[in-house]
Amino acid sequence: MFDIGWPEMLVVAIVLIVIVGPKDLPAMLRTFGRTTSKLRSMAGDFRKQFDEAHQILSTDLELRHRGQEETAFRFRLTDAGDLVEGSVSTLRRPLITGQGFMGN
């Protein structure tokens, strides 16, 4: 992530010792470590919440898609049922009137 080598780390350490002083440096590094740990924890929590929201949205979209497919299937099934019902009623009419299938 950061391209920091040993020479750069040595320069940073010398600057910290000069600016902060050797007496306060351990306390400052501890505070920095705790703050870094808290930031990582917060980033992990954010990531977890983001992943949960993504999973919920993905599931919702999948269910909507399935619902659309189911609705389309119901329409096709209803159309097929109407077609069969129309054919049955067409076949019943001659039987009810006594004409037979061939119009006898």
Image (spheres, helix red, strand yellow):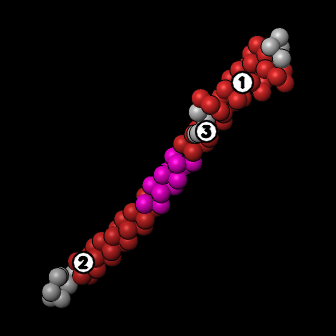
**Mark-to-mark CA distance, 1 and 2:** 97 Å
Residue matched to label 3: 2
Of tags 3 and 2, the one toward the viewer is 3
Please state which amino acid type lies under the numbered disc 1: Ala
Please state which amino acid type lies under the numbered disc 2: Leu
- Residue ID at (70%, 29%): 11
With respect to residue 10, does 68 lie above or below?
Answer: below
**Contact flag, marks 1 and 2 (Cβ < 8 Å):** no
Q: Give the range drawn in magenta.
A: 57-69
Q: Please report whichever mark, 1 or 3, sits nearer to the chain's N-terminal start.
A: 3
- The C terminus appears in which quarter of the rendering? bottom left
To which quarter of the image does residue 103 belong? Answer: bottom left
Label 1 residue SS = helix
The total number of labels drawn is 3
Q: How crowded is mark 2: few (under 14 residues within 10 Å), some or many (20 or more)?
A: few
- Residue ID at (36%, 65%): 77
Q: Please report whichever mark, 1 or 2, sits nearer to the chain's N-terminal start.
A: 1
Please state which amino acid type lies under the numbered disc 3: Phe
Position of residue 2 measured from the top left corner of the image (x, y, whole percent): 61, 39
- Residue ID at (57%, 48%): 57
- In the figure, is residue 16 to the left or right of 1? right
- On residue 91, the disc is 2
- In the figure, is residue 33 to the left or right of 103? right
Position of residue 49 measured from the top left corner of the image (x, y, whole percent): 63, 36
Give the main secondary structure, helix, strand or loop, of the magenta stretch.
Answer: helix
Q: Please report whichever mark, 3 or 2, sits nearer to the chain's N-terminal start.
A: 3
Is residue 100 within the magenta segment?
no
Comparing 40 with 20, the one in front is 20
